[in-house]
Each structure stands twice: as structure tokens, then as C-alpha cells.
Amino acid sequence: MFLFDEAKKNHYEVLGIANTATEAEIKGAYFKLVRKYQPDRFPEEFKEIRAAYETLRDGQKRAEYDAIGHLPDSVAPLFHEARRFDRLGRRDKAKELYQIILKSHPELDHVREEYAFSLSADDKTGKASEAWEELCRRHPDNPRYARELGHCYFDRGWHKKAQAEARRSLALDRSSIESWFLLISSMVEGLKNSPSMWDELGASTNEALEAVKEVKTNEWEKIYLHAHAFLTGGIENIDKAGKHLREIIRLIREGGREGRNKGHLALREILTLVPANSLAALYPDLKEMADLLPDLPGLIRGKLDAVRLAFDIEGLVKKKYHEIFRDLFRILNSDMEEDEDELEVIAIEYHLLEDKKTFDPQLRRLKEEYPELYALHGSFFNTALRTRDPEKMLYQRMKKYKKSARKNAAYDDGEEEEPDSAPPETVRRSQPKVGRNDPCPCGSGRKYKHCCGA
């Protein structure tokens, strides 16, 4: 007797699992059934069990089945046509057909899902949100629907709502890399309005990495999580920061095109948000990471070059250069935004000039071994090497230092005059100008220089 009747053709029902079942649950249900319905005794039942398992175990086949699994004959052609229009980019036509189907069959959730995806792809995030909200109401225990609704909220700029949906999705499935990705992305956007969230972001990132440790599907998504663990964990712990970078490198190598795409984002955030001098010790790993990513923008290349210079700077002392060069280049390789930096550079220049006999040989060696570092302050170095009158340069540096120090002190005391926003008012004489040899205007008959102008 055939145990699976015609009304029970749904693959999920055949295996006795929910349509949100995991890979492990599908596999467990299958082996439990085949032990009960052995192929030699129940060939028909086994065939149906096997068909259900073969479809649902394969991610692509399962997605296709979920989309078109059990459409009524009256709407199946419309649905196939709508999906064809979607693939061709003719989304207005696709959405029109989805709406026709849903008007007569509002219970077809997989059609509503395709309709929501089509709306999102067409940047109709308002209507897409409504579609996902309806699906979430119908299936409150479906983590994927909660995540997709969160993505819609994120695209609309509703980052707190996106966080809430990400957390709801994670409460249902903590191993979802995509949901953690949505949560972290939403929190990053929230930092713009609430910098105090930085510690919370770091805690969530570490929690995410722990939760997805054993997940092997879509592993390239972990690149983003490791990048934020790197940023929020602080790079003072070089060993820990290096581990995150090396894990990103591994994921880029194994992640194909998607891994490279995520790698671009990770490298951009690291180089943009962390000063070059702070990344110096990690340059070899960053260089290896960059070599895996083709077509890096010029801005990112420039940031990486700054890190390379910082790496060379930190190695100067090991190469027997005086530490004063390291201190100077650290300042020059930053943006020198502070007035104190300018004072320190002047003080270092003074010291180099004061002891030329000691530093000139190192300057010449620096020019040969590290031309790019030398070029950071090449104008001063060249003049210092050529000059035969270091006393004059010393005097100029001392004068400049005192002037800058006075300016900073006046600014700190609030005495510095603000520059005028408009040119000074012109003062006009009330009487005509009188030359010294002209007759005096008082009427004495004498020259002005011998009278009132004396």
C-alpha cells in the first residue's frame, strides 16, 4: 500500500520537517525514514522519500523548489513568465504578473516572496517592506523573512529597525552569517549618531564570530566580521589584530569573486579608519591582502603606501639609524594637524643641524637606502647637507620656533586675534593734504614746515 497519498506531495511533508529545516535536520529525517521504508520492501515510498531528499539537500534545487514547488495549474504559467521578466530586468511587467497571481491566490507565500525581491531590486523599498512585513506576520518563526525585512529597513535608512529585525532573526537562528552581517552593518551606521555604541559593536562582533565559527556555507561573509573585530578590538594587541588579518586573507583566497568583493570593503575600512603609523607592524599582512585584490582604487593604494612608509620608519632604529629620524618621519607621515607637531619638527631640525658631524653621514645613507622617506623632508635635508653656514640655519630655526611657540601660547590663552572677515575701513581726511613746502593753512604766510607743521 502506498503510504504517501497524492495530497501529500510536498517534499517537506514527505520528510516530516518544516520548510525552515537545516541541512542536518533534512539529513536526519531522511535516514530515519529510509530505515523505516526500505527500498526492497517499499519501493514507491522510498522513491518519493529519495526524491524529496535529493531536492532539499541541494541549496540551488531547494531554492528553486521553494519558489515553484506547488503552484496551482491556473497560475503556474503566469509565475514562470513573471520570473522570466525578472531575469530580463523587466520588473514592471514581472511585478504586474505577481500582483495578478496574489490577487487570486494571496496564500501563495513563495509568490509574495518573489514579488518582494522584485520590488527590492527595483528600489521600491517601501512596498518591499510591506511585502516582507506581511510574510513576517504569516511566519513569525521564519528567520529569513525577518532578515530580508531588516535589509529593506536598512536600505530605507531605518537602522534601529534593521537592528531589531536582525536580532529577531538571530534569536531564531544564531548561526546565520547574513543576519550577523546585517546587525553589524546597522550598528556601524548607528555610530554616526551615537559614538558610544563602539564598545557594543565590538562585543557584538566577537559574539558573531563565536556563533558562526562552525558555519561553512558563505564563509566569505566572515571577512566583514573579522574586519570589524580588527577595528573594534584595538590594534594595540598586534598578535590578535594579526590573527584577524590572516583569517581575512585565508577567506579571500577561498572565497572566489565574493571573497575578493568583501576583501575590497574590508581593506578600505581598515586603511581609512586606522592611521598609517598604527598599522606599521601589520604591513606585511596588509600587503599580502592587497596583492589578492585586483584593481584597487588609487586612494587605497595611497593609504597602503603610507603604511609601507610607516613600516620602513619603524625599522630605522634596527638599521642603526638614530631614533630622532624615526620620530621625525612619524610626524611627517601623519597629517600634521597639530601645532605641536610643527614645533617638534622645528626642534628636530635644530638638533640635526647642531650635530651635523654625527647626522650628515646618516642623512646620506638615508638618501641612498630609503629615497621615499628622504623625500618626505627632502628640501630641508638637501639644504642641511649643502650648507656651509649651519649657524645661520640654527638661528632661523630658533627664531621660527619662538614665533610658533608664542603663537600657540597666545592661542591657548585666548589672546590670538581672529582674522578680519572684511577689509579695514578706509580713513578719509576731512581737509586737503598739505605739503611741507606749501603755504600754511593758518594764513601766516609762512611755509607749513616752518609754521604749524614744525
Image (spheres, helix red, strand yellow):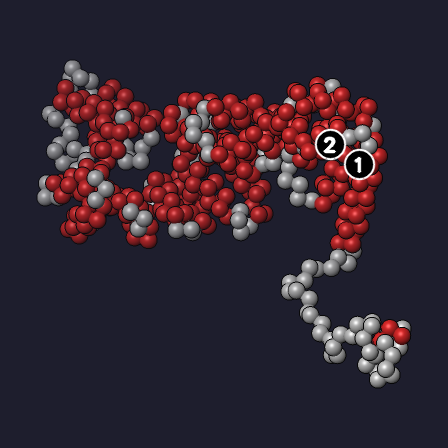
Residue 223: horizontal and vertical position, in percent? 46, 30
Q: Residue at x 59, y 30 (%)?
A: 307
Amino acid type, residue under disc 1 in the picture: Met
Count the numbered circles shown: 2
Give the quarter of the figure containing the C terminus: bottom right
Amino acid type, residue under disc 2 in the picture: Thr
The residue at the far top in this view is: 40
Q: Where is 422 relative to 341, above or below?
A: below
Give SS at disc 1. Answer: helix
Residue 14: horizontal and vertical position, in percent? 21, 30
Q: Where is 305 relative to 151, above or below?
A: above
Residue 255: horizontal and vertical position, in percent? 40, 25
Residue placed most toward the observer, 58 or 187: 187
Give the quarter of the figure containing the N terminus: top left
Mark number displayed over residue 274: none
Q: Where is 341 relative to 56, above or below?
A: below
Q: Residue at x 80, y 40 (%)?
A: 396
- Characterize the local packing of mark 2: few (<14), some (14-19) or many (20 or more) Cα atoms within 10 angstroms: few
Mark number displayed over residue 393: 1
Disc on the earlier residue, 2 or 1: 2
Q: Which residue is drawn at 78% across and 25% down?
A: 359
Residue placed most toward the observer, 447 or 407: 447
Give SS at disc 2. Answer: helix
- For disc 2, the marked residue is 383
The residue at the far bottom in this view is: 443
